[in-house]
Amino acid sequence: MESNNNTSKIALIVLAVLTAVFGVLYFRSNQLTQEQATSIEEKATELANTRVKLDSISTQLDSKIAEIKELGGQVADLEALKLQLEQDKASLKKANHATVASYLAKIKEYDVILAQKDGDIVELKKQNGVLTENNQVLSTQNQTLNTENTGLKTVNKNLSDTLSEVAAKNKELARKVSIGAALKAQNIRVLAVNAKGKETEKAKLGGKRIDKLKIVFNLAPNPITKLENKTIYVRILDGEGSTLSDEAVGSGKINQGGKDIPFTTSQVVTYSNDNQEVAVLYSRGGVVYKPGKYSIEMYSEGFAIGNGTFVVR
């Protein structure tokens, strides 16, 4: 009987000890679970706060970039910083508790840079205030210069108009002087010269006996004509209006009235202003002149200076 009682007591003691042990184990397990939950919650809060701070810095960077651009400052460094920030934000999504601390350090660096840019913005605003004042002064000066320039343009136009009028008058005067100074051939006569050099002056020349034509004339005195060499061009036209021309004996072309016209012969004469007599020879050997009335035209220095006629029978 006594042995049974001892066994029962031992069993109760063992049960009590096991119950205590299990109680302690349960308490410790429950405590660990709560600590883990608290730790996870703290980590999540840190990550969320870090993301919020980075988003705030991103917004501030955008604002600073826009303001500095408007003030005319350089934003290349801020734009590079904004790119780095976006990369940090993307990396943070994969971060754990161990790496959050490094982001907090970066946030401090970003805050320092933003503070520096606030100082830069203040300086830029001061500079722009000076520039605005200078621009107002320059604008006033520009308006004054524009007014003066308008006045100068008016004066210049008036001077230009006056100069144009003077130039036109001078040109007209020069034209009149040129006309007045033009040579004038008078007393034009035509002689036939045969192969032996005999000269014949008749109302009608024999075509078969003409070896050369000799055109004789006087140059009228003119006090405003320069005493210098003058080239006189002679055109001989047959009854059909064709110009006698042979380059082998000195024929060519001259510009008269804007047109190139053929001439028969030419001769350089030294003008002496004393009614000098001039003789021009035209040799067209071996050619028989057709019967009819021939015309003679003379030119010098762009002007027609005389004309005459002769008849070949």
Image (tube, rainbow, N blue to C red):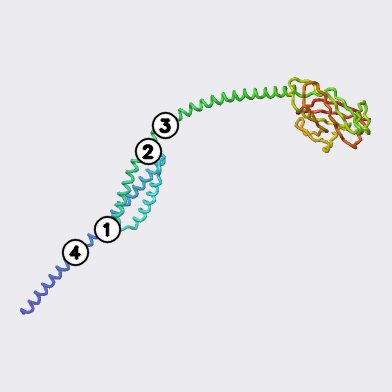
| Kind of residue at disc 3 | Asn
Q: Secondary structure at mark 3?
A: helix
| Kind of residue at disc 2 | Leu
| Count of numbered tags | 4
| Kind of residue at disc 4 | Arg
Q: Position of residue 169 (x, y in %)?
A: 67, 22
Q: Quadrant of residue 20?
A: bottom left
The span from disc 1 to disc 4 (Cα, nearest Å) is: 18 Å
Q: Position of residue 25 (x, y in %)?
A: 18, 66
The span from disc 2 to disc 1 (Cα, nearest Å) is: 47 Å
The structure residue drawn at horizontal position 76% and vertical position 24%, both measured from the top left corner, is: 182
Of the numbered discs 1 and 4, the one sitting upstream in the chain is 4
Of the numbered discs 2 and 1, the one sitting upstream in the chain is 1
* 97 on left or right of 86: left
Circle 4 is placed at which residue position?
28
Q: Quadrant of residue 187?
A: top right
Are there few (<14), some (14-19), or many (20+) residues within 10 Å of tag 2?
Answer: some
Of the numbered discs 3 and 4, the one sitting upstream in the chain is 4
Tag 2–tag 4 contact (CB < 8 Å) = no
Quadrant including the N terminus: bottom left
- Between 89 and 136, the one lying in front of the other is 136
Q: Which residue lies most toward the front here?
A: 196
Circle 2 is placed at which residue position?
124
Marking on residue 134: 3
Marking on residue 40: 1
Marking on residue 215: none
The structure residue drawn at horizontal position 41% and vertical position 40%, both measured from the top left corner, is: 72
Of the numbered discs 1 and 3, the one sitting upstream in the chain is 1
Of the numbered discs 2 and 4, the one sitting upstream in the chain is 4
| Kind of residue at disc 1 | Ile
